[in-house]
Image (cartoon, grey):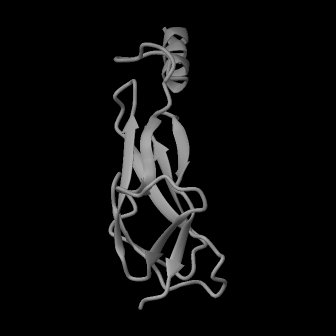
Amino acid sequence: MLRSRSSLFVLLALGLGGPGCGGANHQPVITAGPRPLGSPSTPGGLKFEEGTQIQLQLEVKDQDEDEIFFLWTQSPANPAGAFSSTTVATPTWTVPPPPEDPKQAFRLFVEVKDGNGGVLLGQSPDIYVLPKQ
């Protein structure tokens, strides 16, 4: 009896047994975004005036229909823009003041996890900040 319990533990620890387990987990797939909603696909990046609140677009599918978790960040971290939430699929982001170097682009990153080991990273196009007029 002890041996069968040990085998069950190993199967569950490896994700090979238990209800709803039909094989390997499929990684989530980004089908749109991450990018500012409605932004054109232009080479050289996107330009927004500081203080502008941008609605971000992100569409993700998971073949296994797992619950999806999100974590948004910006690079460089300073000057900091403001996400309405860093843990939802489509937050808004308020454009920060321009960096010291006007050629410095911001990039928004989103880490997408399915809670079963599937992880991917999405990156926005380059975003350049225009000073407020």
Q: Position of residue 30 (x, y in %)?
A: 45, 39
Is residue 33 at least partly visible in the picture? yes
Q: What residue is rendered at 51% in x and 64% in y? A: 73
Instruction: Say above or below: 37 vs 74.
Output: above
Q: Is residue 55 left or right of residue 27?
A: left
Query: Looking at the figure, which quarter contains the C terminus?
Result: bottom left
Instruction: Say above or below: 27 vs 5.
Output: below
Instruction: Say above or below: 16 vs 90.
Output: above
Q: Position of residue 6 (x, y in %)?
A: 54, 17
Which residue is the extreme one toward the bottom? 133
Q: Is residue 11 left or right of residue 65?
A: right
Q: Quadrant of residue 120?
A: top right
Q: Quadrant of residue 68?
A: top left
Q: Is residue 101 left or right of residue 111?
A: right
106 and 18: which is toward the camera: 106
Q: What residue is rendered at 37% in x and 42% in y? A: 59
Q: What residue is rendered at 64% in x and 75% in y? A: 104
Q: Position of residue 54 (x, y in %)?
A: 35, 67
Q: Position of residue 49 (x, y in %)?
A: 43, 80
100 and 41: which is toward the camera: 41
Is residue 115 at least partly visible in the picture? no
Q: Quadrant of residue 83?
A: bottom left
37 and 76: which is toward the camera: 37
Number of numbered discs on residues: 0
92 and 104: which is toward the camera: 104
